[in-house]
């Protein structure tokens, strides 16, 4: 669903593009981090959208042995995009870290040292995501003014990362206290 919204939205906002150009726009926006859109899914979405007549093949450019399909959004696609956009705004957007919550239920069965190390790994991964998003924002700001709605996205991502890092640190500190008290007894 998000891949389709992204593809339609990009074609609507920027005009006709190839799958590769759409992929480049998404990569520069780090959509793999926040929208979970993978490059291969773009081409699948293009085929599906073309079949459903939400986009159309505008031109097929030949460069040597390679061909580049340029797609544009149709009026039917614009209408469908509008519907998807409004429906997406209606959906609750809170996402719980279900994998973490599930294993927290059974964490007493694991070694405290192993859990602390695993939490360190997770903290590092979240910090790397945070840093990548910061770098992405700074890169965007070098070339143009970042729209207010995009700044809202960045801010929310930072706050989500900070909240999760705080939660993991509290969990880790609790484990360290438990480990310390068990060695003192």
Image: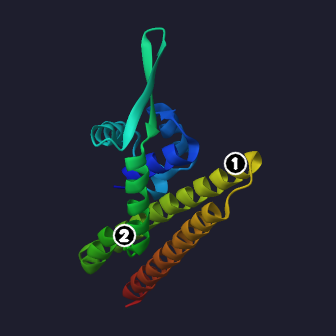
Which residue is painted at 52% across and 34% down in the image? 21
Mark 1 nearby-residue class (10 Å; few <14, some 14–19, many ≥20): few
Identify the residue at the far bottom of this view.
185
Identify the residue at the far top of this view.
64
Against 84, residue 48 (above or below) is above
Mark 2 nearby-residue class (10 Å; few <14, some 14–19, many ≥20): some
Against 111, residue 46 (above or below) is above
Against 143, residue 122 (above or below) is below
Q: Decide: marks 2, 1 in contact (CB < 8 A)?
A: no
Q: Nearer the viewer, mark 2 or mark 1?
A: 1
Query: Which of the 4 image quadrants contains residue 109?
Result: bottom left
Q: Which residue is mark 1?
A: 139
Which residue is painted at 42% across and 47% down in the image? 75
Q: Which residue is mark 2?
A: 115
Side (left or right) of 56 relative to 21: left
Whole-percent x and y of residue 18?
A: 47, 31
Which residue is painted at 56% across and 48% down in the image? 13
Can the viewer see residue 36?
Answer: no
Quarter of the image containing the C terminus? bottom left
């Amino acid at each position: 669903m998000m891949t389709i919204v992204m593809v339609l939205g990009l074609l609507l906002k920027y005009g006709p593009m190839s799958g590769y150009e759409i992929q480049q726009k998404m990569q520069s926006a780090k959509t793999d981090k926040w929208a979970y859109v993978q490059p291969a899914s773009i081409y699948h979405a293009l085929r599906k959208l073309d079949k459903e007549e939400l986009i159309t093949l505008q031109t097929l450019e030949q460069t040597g042995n390679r061909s580049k399909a340029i797609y544009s959004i149709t009026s039917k696609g614009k209408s469908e995009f509008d519907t998807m956009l409004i429906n997406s705004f209606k959906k609750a957007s809170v996402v719980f870290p279900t994998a973490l919550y599930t294993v927290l239920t059974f964490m007493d069965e694991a070694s405290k040292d192993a859990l602390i190390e695993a939490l360190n790994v997770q903290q590092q991964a979240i910090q790397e995501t945070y840093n990548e998003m910061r770098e992405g924002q700074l890169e965007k700001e070098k070339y143009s003014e970042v729209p207010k709605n995009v700044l809202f996205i960045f801010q929310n991502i930072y706050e989500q990362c900070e909240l999760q890092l705080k939660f993991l640190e509290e969990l880790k500190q609790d484990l360290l206290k438990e480990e310390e008290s068990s060695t003192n007894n």
